[in-house]
């Protein structure tokens, strides 16, 4: 398990290659506050709380582009803090959604029109979405609007990847000295830390044997690892 610092800020990462999973740290979390349990919980999002007994729709809690939320079907409600995502239960989520919907505060999410497949670089899904301002393609936190003459039903993965790459490159454009400074910063290797856990010999033995949790207190450490070492 790793805590890394990339172009868009700190994130946690588990595994390598096709099995790699990563998640950005919420804005109200500091890198120093992240331990192994928090990293695992973050990578497990979104979490399904259950189903609405009335509609049968799944109710989930997660952290998206605009922060923590609960969602039922195509309607979602923002939560006040990221920690709520891990503690809110089905009843509380349904109550808040009902109150917010009655007050006109529940928003509709973008609709997935098509799943195009995994991105060739990181394996994350690339989708064609229908949003408030028209169709677009999405990959992680990168979004690119489709050209006005493009048919959402005919866009393929290669075309979507090209649009997303152009959008990402456009977002990095700078002028004059700022562009030069940005290029210099871009050559630096991202810092990488290992999220590990120091335990007593008793706890290590219990884990090795597949036993239950030990009573010994565990101390989480974050050890810096030189890139390429």
Image (cartoon, rainbow, N blue to C red):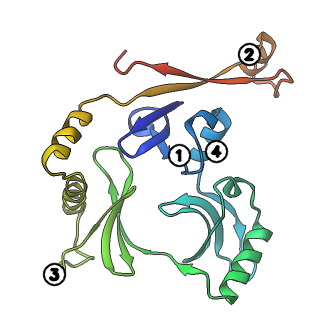
Mark 4 / mark 3, whichever is N-terminal? 4
Instruction: Check whether the beta carbons of the residues at disc 4 and disc 3 lie within 8 A of each other.
Output: no
**Residue 7's spot in the image, x, y percent?**
35, 42
Q: Which residue is mark 4?
A: 41
Mark nearest the camera among 1 and 3 is: 1
Mark nearest the camera among 4 and 2 is: 4
- Taking the spot 77% from the left edge, 76% from the top edge, the residue there is 95
- Taking the spot 23% from the left edge, 59% from the top edge, the residue there is 167
Q: Which residue is mark 1?
A: 25
**Residue 168's spot in the image, x, y percent?**
25, 54
SS for callout 2: helix
Q: Is residue 113 shown left or right of residue 34?
A: left
Q: Which of 87 and 45 lies nearest the eye of the viewer?
A: 87
Mark 4 / mark 1, whichever is N-terminal? 1
Q: Which residue is mark 2?
A: 204
Q: Which residue is mark 3?
A: 149
Work out which residue is located at the far right of the displayed protein and give it: 215
Q: Which of the 4 image quadrants contains residue 136?
A: bottom left
**Residue 219's spot in the image, x, y percent?**
72, 23
Work out which residue is located at the far top of the displayed protein and give it: 201
Q: Which of 65 and 21 lies nearest the eye of the viewer?
A: 65
SS for callout 3: loop
Q: Is residue 200 shown left or right of residue 197?
A: right
Q: Is residue 96 shown left or right of residue 126?
A: right
């Amino acid at each position: 398990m790793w805590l890394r610092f990339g172009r868009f800020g700190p994130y946690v990462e588990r595994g390598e290659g096709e099995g790699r999973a990563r998640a950005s740290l919420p804005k109200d979390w500091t890198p120093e506050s992240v331990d192994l349990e928090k990293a695992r919980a973050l990578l497990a999002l979104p979490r399904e709380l259950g189903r609405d007994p009335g509609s049968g729709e799944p109710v989930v809690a997660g952290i998206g582009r605009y922060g923590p939320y609960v969602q039922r079907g195509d309607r979602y409600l923002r939560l006040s803090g990221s920690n709520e995502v891990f503690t809110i239960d089905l009843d509380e989520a349904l109550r808040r959604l009902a109150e917010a919907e009655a007050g006109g505060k529940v928003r509709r999410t973008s609709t997935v029109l098509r799943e195009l497949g995994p991105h060739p670089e990181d394996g994350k899904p690339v989708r064609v979405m229908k949003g408030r301002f028209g169709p677009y393609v999405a990959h992680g936190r990168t979004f690119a609007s489709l050209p006005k003459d493009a048919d959402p039903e005919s866009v393929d993965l290669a075309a979507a990847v090209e649009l997303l790459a152009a959008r990402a490159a456009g977002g990095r454009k700078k002028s004059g000295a700022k562009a030069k400074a940005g290029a210099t910063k871009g050559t630096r290797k991202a810092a990488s830390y290992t999220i590990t856990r120091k335990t007593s010999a008793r706890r290590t033995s219990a884990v090795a044997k597949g036993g239950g949790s030990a009573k010994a207190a565990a101390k989480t450490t974050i050890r810096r690892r030189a890139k390429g070492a």
